[in-house]
């Protein structure tokens, strides 16, 4: 084995530490002498303080251009504001899928726009890169809050945004300007803006170049580069190259898949394979994809009609999206060939039926999930039906996916997945696509974005491998960070935003950090719930009769009798100890605390405890509690939820 250490000590000199070229020199030195991958070397710098002194001069009177991330540094999704003096614009307003362990099945999370609201007079509009939930879905919640600023976008994105607003009165309030993305440079406040087409999985996806009074900022949005896309045009590399030649100071870069080696598969391959499967399958064919994968849906519809097969659409979001595509002529097929899923799919010859179904893997009510459980109202799967899964499996959902697949093959349903042939291509570019973009734009600074920290660091390493100066890769930790663009450089600001996690749960919108409900759900999901009711005499405050007890997901049937009896005896003993000394609500609060410890001791579980009481006047059999108390009883605070 070669003794690399000795070689280093005898043949090399140490790099100087302070000049700009030292990083590159060091990198070459390490690579030459140690034969190691630079990704390991570069991680060394991640411990540097975020707000270290910039290595450029800031003029005391200078106002920087500010770029702030409200969504995109800790999750998949995008919502950025760009601010200069009296003008501010937003780029996208996406949502984050709420992870069940953090939010316990709340619907989704939206960006905290309190900073934008505080500066509402500056807000001149919102640019939209494309219609995907993680880029536009928060609009329906935040547009009313921001008094409906103008949306700058393209027809498909606008059409789908309007669909996401359920109330037609609110749809009417949406103000917008459709952008001619080929030629137009739009002026919004002090900013000049150009759209440049990229590929993704939905038509009309655009990177955006924002020319500010100081520098140009470029955001790639979600992108891949496809020279043979099956539905829309190839990415506009000429325009992107021109923008790069004119000078990009700061590039905000979609990090997803930047760690995957080589180029992402072209949609042309997927088109050809889908076409083959649709033509040759003699049975009913069910193709499941995300409703947001509009490209795939259009590919399926065009191929099915070409082969004289009828497409049945299943799932509300699929129906909505295809309706907009029809209005805009992305889907132009005879009406008979495109129908909402109904019983006729059971009556037609098998080789004439294609069902295009939603498949949201985090959502157990997606159409495919219901079919796989034989709970779908319109269609019953039967032997030899063929299901094609044209999406990738979300990593944390692999177990649930395997269960679904097992159920299907056990019923002799055919399954075709990406393991069999290429029936799905990623929506985001791989390493070589990212490298091309960086070469074309040649930014002075860039910020890996649209992901949490670990993938963003992988992205950073890719740029370092291309000899990008590590000092100029901006790596804020969290969404509260603001990036400042000065005449002489770019830095992370000392100013930080205070952001909350804003949850949407049904019709409820609130800050995660303020709310008990989510915590209560978590406790119940882990250790169950116990509730008991005391009937208390209005005059003497003694317990009348039995204590009623109920529990859920807490004790097993073999132990329920003994444990419930022990708990009831414990409650009675404690109540009799305290009831003469304090008001009933405080007695129950104390019992709750002590009962929690008691239960932990006897069975090592800590359920959510909900004590309740009812006053009964034994003499007049007339309750003297007021109506409000009768309905509310104890609030969560009174039960000890501080
Ligand atoms: Zn997207």
Image: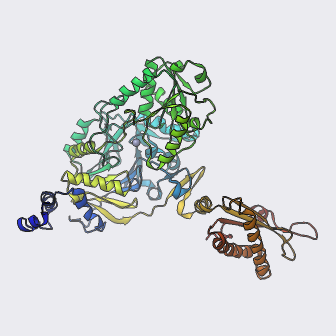
User: Would residue 317 be found to the left or right of residue 595 on screen?
Assistant: left
Residue 343: image location, x then y, percent:
62, 24
**Vertically, is 266 above or below 561?**
above
Question: Is residue 495 in view?
Answer: yes
**Vertically, is 119 above or below 597?**
above
* Residue furthest front as drawn: 1
Which quarter of the image is occupied by the N terminus?
A: bottom left
Rendered residue at 40%/61% (across/down): 480
User: Would residue 12 be found to the left or right of residue 274 on screen?
Assistant: left
Residue 27: image location, x then y, percent:
16, 59
Residue 119: image location, x then y, percent:
43, 57
Rendered residue at 49%/52% (across/down): 110
Report the front residue among 172 and 258: 258
Question: Is residue 138 in view?
Answer: no
Residue 503: image location, x then y, percent:
53, 55
Asked which quadrant contains residue 539, the reply is: bottom right
* Residue furthest bottom as drawn: 581
Ligand 1 positioned in quadrant: top left
Which quarter of the image is occupied by the C terminus?
A: bottom right
Rendered residue at 12%/63% (across/down): 3
Asked which quadrant contains residue 541, the reply is: bottom right
Count of marks overlaid on the render: 0
* Residue furthest left as drawn: 11
**Vertically, is 363 above or below 448?**
above
User: Would residue 199 be found to the left or right of residue 22 on screen?
Assistant: right
User: Would residue 18 be found to the left or right of residue 154 on screen?
Assistant: left
């Amino acid at each position: 084995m070669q003794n690399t250490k000795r070689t280093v000590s005898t043949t090399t000199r140490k790099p100087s530490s302070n000049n700009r070229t030292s990083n590159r020199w060091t990198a070459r030195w390490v690579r030459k002498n140690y034969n190691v991958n630079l990704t390991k070397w570069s991680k060394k710098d991640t411990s540097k303080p975020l707000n270290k002194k910039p290595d450029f001069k800031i003029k005391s009177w200078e106002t920087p251009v500010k770029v702030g991330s409200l969504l995109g540094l800790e999750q998949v999704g995008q919502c950025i504001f760009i601010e200069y003096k009296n003008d501010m614009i937003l780029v996208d307003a996406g949502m984050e899928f709420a992870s069940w362990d953090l939010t316990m099945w709340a619907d989704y999370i939206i960006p905290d726009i309190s900073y934008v609201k505080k500066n509402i007079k500056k807000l001149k509009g919102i640019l939209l890169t494309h219609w995907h939930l993680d880029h536009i879905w928060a609009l329906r919640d935040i547009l009313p809050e921001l008094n409906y600023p103008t949306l700058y976008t393209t027809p498909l994105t606008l059409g789908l945004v309007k669909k996401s607003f359920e109330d037609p009165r609110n749809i009417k309030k949406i103000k917008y300007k459709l952008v001619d993305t080929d030629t137009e440079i739009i002026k919004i406040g002090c900013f000049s803006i150009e759209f440049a087409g990229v590929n993704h999985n939905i038509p009309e996806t655009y990177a955006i170049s924002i020319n500010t009074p100081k520098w140009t900022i470029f955001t790639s949005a979600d992108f891949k580069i496809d020279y043979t896309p099956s539905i829309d045009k190839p990415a506009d590399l000429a325009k992107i190259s021109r923008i790069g030649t004119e000078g990009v100071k700061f590039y905000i870069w979609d990090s997803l898949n930047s760690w995957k080696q080589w180029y992402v598969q072209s949609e042309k391959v997927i088109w050809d394979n889908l076409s083959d499967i649709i033509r040759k399958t003699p049975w009913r064919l069910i193709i499941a994809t995300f409703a947001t994968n509009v490209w795939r849906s259009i590919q399926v519809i065009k191929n099915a009609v070409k082969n004289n097969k009828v497409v049945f659409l299943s799932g509300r979001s699929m129906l909505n999206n295809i309706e907009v595509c029809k209005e805009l002529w992305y889907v132009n097929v005879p009406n008979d060939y495109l129908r909402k899923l109904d019983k006729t799919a059971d009556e037609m010859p098998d080789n004439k039926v294609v069902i295009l179904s939603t498949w949201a893997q985090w959502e157990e009510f997606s159409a495919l999930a219901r079919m796989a459980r034989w709970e779908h109202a319109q269609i019953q799967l039967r032997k030899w039906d063929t299901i094609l899964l044209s999406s990738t499996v979300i990593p944390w959902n692999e177990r649930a996916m395997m269960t679904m697949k097992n159920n299907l093959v056990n019923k002799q349903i055919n399954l075709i997945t990406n393991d069999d042939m290429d029936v799905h291509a990623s929506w985001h570019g791989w390493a070589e696509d990212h490298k091309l973009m960086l070469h074309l734009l040649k930014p002075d600074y860039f910020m890996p974005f649209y992901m949490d920290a670990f993938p963003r660091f992988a992205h950073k390493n890719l740029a370092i491998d291309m000899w990008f100066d590590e000092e100029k890769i901006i790596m804020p930790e969290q969404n509260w960070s603001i990036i400042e663009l000065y005449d002489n450089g770019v830095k992370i600001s000392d100013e930080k935003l205070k952001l909350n996690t804003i949850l949407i749960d049904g019709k409820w919108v609130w800050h995660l950090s303020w709310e008990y409900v989510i915590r209560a759900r978590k406790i119940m999901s882990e250790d169950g719930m116990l509730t008991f009711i005391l009937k208390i005499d209005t005059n003497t405050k003694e317990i009348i009769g039995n204590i009623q007890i109920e529990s859920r997901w807490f004790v097993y049937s073999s132990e329920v009798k003994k444990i419930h009896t022990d708990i009831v005896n414990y409650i009675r003993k404690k109540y009799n100890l305290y009831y003469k000394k304090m008001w009933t609500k405080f007695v129950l609060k104390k019992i709750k605390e002590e009962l929690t410890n008691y239960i932990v001791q006897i069975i090592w579980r800590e359920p959510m405890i909900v004590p309740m009481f009812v006053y009964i006047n034994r003499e007049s059999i007339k309750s003297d509690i007021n109506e409000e108390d009768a309905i509310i009883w104890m609030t969560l605070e009174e039960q000890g939820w501080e």
